[in-house]
Image (spheres, grey):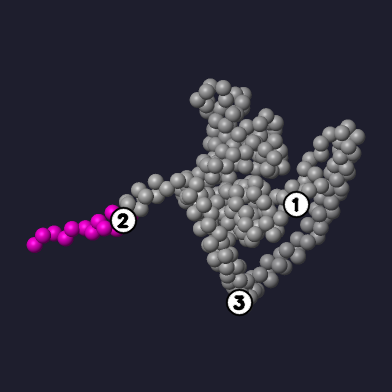
Amino acid sequence: MPKDRPNLGPFAILGVFLFIWTLIPSSWKAVTKTKFDEFHAPLWEITSRLDDLSDYWGHLSDSKKTLIAKNRDLARIRADFDVQSERKLTLENELAKINGLKAYVNSLELQLGLDQARSYRPIIARVSHRSLSGWWQSLSIRKGTIDGLYQGLGGVFSDGIAGRLIQVDSNFAKLELACNSNFRIVGTFRGDDRPVTFQGGGILAGGRPWGMVLDVPHDLSASQENPLTLVTSDLGGTFPSGIPIGKVIELEESGDGLFKTGLVKLSNNLSKLSEVTILVPDSQN
């Protein structure tokens, strides 16, 4: 009897589809993708809100043993209250000194006619969907134009920068992650005010996000023992200066021989975000 031949029909159909897709103009692809995101945004939001509700009811149904453990932890916190109160008082005194210095600096800036630093209004948004494919590293959030968001705003989280808004609808927005290859901003190394360029590099095997730093001056060096911390610069206009971007542990000569380049290790939590803070420039500045 003849051997069974494999069914190549599905592969042939897939090949035809991919061939047709390559012939479609890029502008049509962009429009199709935008409409696809707008169609799925309400579904992503509903799923995200159901997850939040599930977590809420899960805490309400904690067992007696779990509640006892939580009360024990609370007792430990209360035991440290006196120590923390003393530390808080010290920090408040230091903060008062810092605020006094800031007020003095602001008064000098006004007298000298210098530009004051831009202030930002934070808007916290929940993540409703993640897109971490080989081509797209982005997040969809449950905020939009009705919340005062617009395209180009920067997003941050506890470990540093998260990305930048590239699409904003009435009640949802898409944030391009810092590891996306299309993401570029001006940065500096902590302790050095010379500008360098950061560009996203994608996600390595194991889910590790990374990027590249370009145009690094020749006199800078980095190692595993003495890494350089890359931070934002206000020259880029998207973020305030000093927000962490990532760590650089090695620099090498670039192709033009004028500068150095290096790999930037981003936070592992970048691809696991459930919440981001969008920075909206204060209209008074």
Residue 273: in sight, yes or no? no
Magenta-highlighted residues: 1-14
Which of the image's four quarters has the N terminus?
A: bottom left
Disc number at residue 9?
none
Mark nearer the viewer, 2 or 3? 2
Decide: is 187 above or below 271: above
Q: Secondary structure at mark 3?
A: loop
The residue labelled by disc 2 is 13
Q: Label 3 crowding class (10 Å Cα cut-off): few <14, some 14-19, many 20+?
A: few
**Quarter of the image with the C terminus in it:** top right
Report, in whole angstroms, how far the alpha carbon at label 1 lies from the one at label 3. Answer: 37 Å
Q: Which residue is mark 1?
A: 121
Q: Tell me residue 14's x, y (percent).
A: 33, 54
How many numbered circles does the render carry? 3
State which tag comes first along the sequence, 2 or 3: 2
Q: Position of residue 67 (x, y in %)?
A: 64, 74
- For image coordinates 56% across by 59% down, the residue present is 38
Q: Secondary structure at mark 1?
A: strand
Q: Nearer the viewer, mark 1 or mark 3?
A: 1
Q: Residues within 10 Å of mark 2 (few under 14, many from 20)?
A: few
Q: Residue at x 68, y 66 (%)?
A: 73
Q: Is residue 15 visible?
A: yes
Helix or strand or loop: what does disc 2 sit on?
A: helix
Residue 128 sits in which quadrant?
A: bottom right
Q: Is residue 46 left or right of residue 118?
A: left
Is 221 placed above or below 51 here? above
The answer to which of 41 and 246 lies nearer the viewer is 41
- Mark earlier in primary sequence (1, 3): 3
Comparing 222 with 274, the one in front is 274
Question: Callout 2, which amino acid?
Answer: Ile
Mark 2 and mark 3 residues within 8 Å of each other at the beta carbon: no
In the picture, the disc for residue 61 is: 3
